Amino acid sequence: MAARESKPNLSHAQVSELISRLYCLTDSEIRPLPSFEDQNFFVSVSEGGEYVLKVVNSADSQNPTLLELQTHAMNFLHQKGFPAQTAILTKTGNLMSLEEIDCGFGPQKYLVRLLTYLPGTTIAKILSSPAILYEVGKMAATMDNVFQEMEHPNLGVLQRDNFSFGLAHVPLLEKYLPAIDGDPMQQVVSEIITQFKAEAVPKMASFRKCINHGDFNDQNILVMQDNQSRYKISGILDFGDMSSGYNIFELAIAIMHMMIESMTPVDVGGHILAGYESVFPLNEAERDCLFLLVLCRFSQVLVLTRYAVLQQPENEEYLALWYSRPGIKYLSLLWELGKHEVDRTWFECAQKYRDQH
């Protein structure tokens, strides 16, 4: 979690100067895009073309190896036919540039990248159908499979042992629990952490390993309508949470985030599960832990975004999208329904898809 001073706060003039100096481009339009810990801008240039300028927070900018690997992963997926962004080289031929910039609290160093702009609207803004939820699950599994083919000398940096948003590191939430003091869900989250240690950790040896996108959520998936007015995935954004993990993590993350946009949240998991298993069927240990891992992801989002608001009060409007949306209500709903009932809904739905094929 980046501290408040870590989040960049560039002015339009500073963005314009970077575009000109690093890429020899002349901006015709600059507008801010939402971001959790970094700063993103849509940039249209008079030479023709639309881009996203990403300014990485100063804390993460201290790990250029990880950022370079994330950028490599985006380019790799693009080469494999996935709708991922690619990085535009600077005029000196680099994927990114470390810039010292004063955003109002003294000069700090920020890594800057210019990425291609992908068309479409975030899946959060559409009414999710079973068909698009199935595609989300299928895309998540296909992406994880393709990542197995990716080679890079620094893949080891994806281990990220102290990454608080990593599903392998749910116990790290304990030190952030004071951020939700007074919230009735604090006790529930504490019990979920205890369950994770007792039930998920012993089964991890049976989980299949992969590289996770790590944040395959409703804000990071773009969709467009085809000629039949059906939605298809047109973009995969934000690889900042990439880490070494497990296939089941990607699935749990996707289910949790897609639930919070749905009028029938519990049903969402079955459609995404069906899509995921059409590519990568789960084993017994993974199936047994799916419900708990979805609860864990809900807990991470609730606690860590509340903590981030304490660190970045000026960014509360965006951060509140995560903790004040139906997410808390749905975590409570899942907790009350319990594993047996939710598993039955999800796995019976997935079985119906298999029966149809």
Image: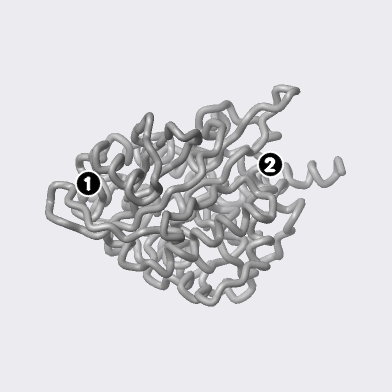
Amino acid type shown at disc 1: Gln
Q: Quadrant of the N terminus?
A: bottom left
Q: How is the image coloured?
A: one colour
Amino acid type shown at disc 2: Glu
Q: Looking at the image, tell me whether mark 1 or mark 2 is earlier in sequence order.
A: 2
Q: Quadrant of residue 224?
A: top right
Q: Secondary structure at mark 2?
A: helix
Residue 275, above or below 243: above
Residue on which the image places disc 2: 135
* Residue placed most toward the observer, 288 or 73: 73
How many neighbours does mark 2 have within 10 angstroms: few (below 14), some (14-19), or many (20 or more)? some
* Residue placed most toward the observer, 85 or 336: 85
Q: Quadrant of the C terminus?
A: top right
Residue 326, above or below 254: above
Residue on which the image places disc 1: 312
Q: Residue 21: x and y, percent?
A: 32, 49
